[in-house]
Image (spheres, rainbow, N blue to C red):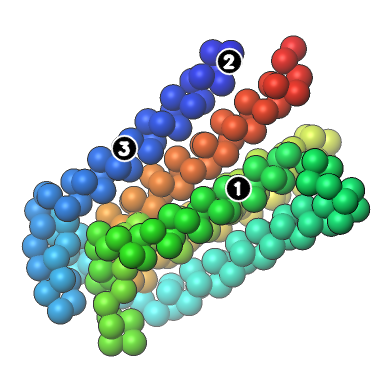
Amino acid sequence: MPKRQKRLFILTGSLFLLFILLTIIMKTVDVKPVGPNQSKIGFASINQFLLNHLGTNSIWYSITNLLGIIAIFFAVGFAISGLCQFIKGKSISKVDFHLLLLGALYILVIAFYVFFEFVIINYRPVLIDSELEASYPSSHTMITICIMASSMLQFHQLLHNSRKRLLIASDVFSVLIIAVTIIGRLLSGVHWFTDIAAAILLSAALVMLYYSVVKWVEYIHNPE
């Protein structure tokens, strides 16, 4: 494996390690019952400070929910594209491996979502329908970042840099959705600050894993 590919995988592993360390710290550092129904939260002081100063905002909550739906449409579009290739070629080997790896990324994202629904690290700072809900990492933020960031990479692969204006527009659109989702989710007050930070870190690790595997497979197909 070339050094470039090795560096990509090392960076991927480092991001996952940082996420694991943050998760461990969340259960051990400054843990206090400052959440709803006296639920315990790690990094309680900074989380409570930011929540008290930023408060909650239902408008931002609705906006970020809408952006999440837009991101899901992107994922569905790529899934349909892969399905069409499979039906046309009558074999999974006829499907572009970029789309197959993208599908694998989506499965990983879903797996992490389900895992943290059962393994509770933090509960939301607000009650949803009068009940506590898992909040770490922010699944909404994680899903949106993973879909939009991987979509940027996929569009560059599909267009092969042949339509620069369209690529620039898609990049700007994707970055805006990611940025507004991160900021809006924090301002909405439905997650603690560290929940969103963890989602960013986990998303970066997952997207980096996808990118690393893509580059590795590309090298296998064309080692020059």
Mark in the foreground, 1 or 3? 1
Disc 2 from disc 1: Cα separation? 22 Å
**Is residue 150 at all visible to an observer of this figure?**
yes
Mark in the foreground, 3 or 2? 2
- In this rendering, would 2 be left or right of 65? right
* Place of residue 113 in the rendered image (x, y in percent of width and height, measured from the top left): 44, 60
Within 10 Å of disc 2 (Cα), the crowding (few <14, some 14-19, many 20+) is few
Label 3, on which residue? Answer: 18
Asked if labels 1 and 2 touch by Cβ distance under 8 angstroms, the answer is: no
Disc 3 from disc 2: Cα separation? 24 Å
- Per the rendering, the mark at residue 104 is 1
- Per the rendering, the mark at residue 71 is none
SS class, disc 3: helix
Question: Who's the residue at 72% across and 55% down the image?
Answer: 78
Task: Say which label, 1 or 3, has the lower sequence index.
Answer: 3
**Is residue 145 at all visible to an observer of this figure?**
no
Task: Say which label, 2 or 1, has the lower sequence index.
Answer: 2
Task: Say which label, 3 or 2, has the lower sequence index.
Answer: 2
* Place of residue 202 in the rendered image (x, y in percent of width and height, measured from the top left): 41, 46
Within 10 Å of disc 3 (Cα), the crowding (few <14, some 14-19, many 20+) is some
In this rendering, the answer to whether 65 lies above or below 127 is: above
Q: In the rendered view of the protein, which quadrant contains the C terminus?
A: top right
Question: Who's the residue at 59% across and 69% down the image?
Answer: 69
